[in-house]
Image (cartoon, rainbow, N blue to C red):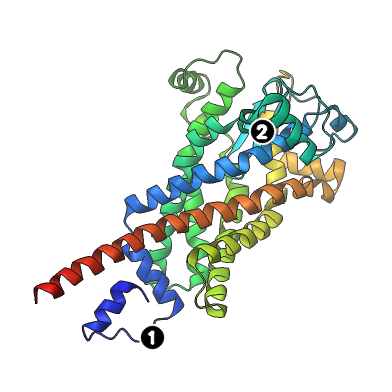
Amino acid sequence: MTKRMELDAGQGQTPGPVSVPARMIEKEQRLTLFQRIVSASVGAMLTSLLVTPLDVVKTRLQAQARVESNPKNAAQCPRCAYINFSNGLMDHTLPRYVVCTHTVRHFTGTLDAFYKITRYEGVASLYNGLPPTLLMAVPATVLYFATYDKLRLQFEQANYGWMSSALLSGSCARVVAATCIAPIELVRTKMQAMQDPPNMLRTAANQVRGQGVFSLWKGLSPTLLRDVPFSAIYWVSVEGGKRRLAEMYPTISDVYASFISGAIGGTIAATCTIPFDVVKTRKQVFDYSPDPAKEEMTTRRILNRIIKTEGYSGLFVGIGPRLMKISPACALMLSSYEFGKQVFLEAEDTSFASHYSQLEGRH
């Protein structure tokens, strides 16, 4: 029960027992769009700062010559000019020369890579790729989380069950966010693939002039094929986990519950959608391959090719590094987002209590 509800009870307005879902809805209704935007922005920046070094190390390990013995993953293949980079919030297809500029030392493992990169190249090298991440991840995350919260609240008020509300809201929010960000993402990726790229507007104009307006959404289908199921599974797992934890531990903080549920939900969703992630990664590499004679690789063709040449196990390549990255990223993002919202709610409760005390003092 919030302080506002306690004060109402003190005035004779007894709220009665409040269920977990009702308490959650009451909190969400009090938050403004601005408060959600600030909370999501802080969460995206914090997650980027904490998770990006993990993916830099992973990518540098992939760039070593040892991948020649296992070229299954197109993102790791030494013959490809590009490497897939993702920190749990955004995906990037970076030119190999960008990733491998400083890769002159052999790393024996993750801890060894952390040590050598920090010692010989400086801490700043652990944040290669952070600027484009912040440029894209912050607006994309804000749009995604704000849309999800708004839709879920409306679905629950329309008497949809919590599971249906989470599934529908998560799917729709991802479609909205991915569709809005796709043109910027495509232009940014093309600019990263150029030695001396023009500005963003000129790059977009060249793309439209050469291939038409709808080409700005090229690659959206494999993105949605991976992200929409991930989002639906993730939010159903998160909302179910938060409710279960609230019932088992009534005094648990929303932040702690969000951290635990986010980690579990991220693990489940990442495991279920790894085949879509593999297909998307392969398509990115094929789309930006410098080979002029390459054939157009559709999502279905890539999927059939993986199964034919590598078997069904090829659809689960890289599941270990993906879980190591996605799980903490989801936990950090969700818990920091909830922490931001909690700060706003507590500030509002404090202000309300102060104002009420002043009114009582006048009487």
Residue type indicated by callout 1: Pro
Q: Residue at label 2? A: 284
**291 lies above or below 302:** above
**Residue closer to the observer: 250 or 244:** 250
The front one of 159 and 91 is 91
Judge from the rendering whether residue 241 lies leftward or rightward of residue 288; answer left or right: left
Crowd band around label 1 with a 10 angstrom C-alpha radius: few (<14), some (14–19), many (20+): few
* In front: label 2 or label 1: 1
* Disc 1 secondary structure class: loop
User: Are the residues flagged by discs 2 and 1 in contact, CB closer than 8 Å?
Assistant: no
How far, Cα to Cα, is label 2 from label 1?
53 Å
- Quadrant location, the N terminus: bottom left
Q: Which numbered tag is attached to residue 340?
A: none
Q: Residue furthest front?
A: 361
Indicate the secondary structure of the residue bearing disc 2. helix
Q: Residue at x 46, y 59 (%)?
A: 338
In percent of width and height, residue 166 lies at 50, 64
Q: Quadrant of residue 355?
A: bottom left
Which residue, given by chain and number where applicable, does mark 1 sit on?
A: 17
Q: Residue at x 28, y 86 (%)?
A: 14
Quadrant placement of the C terminus? bottom left
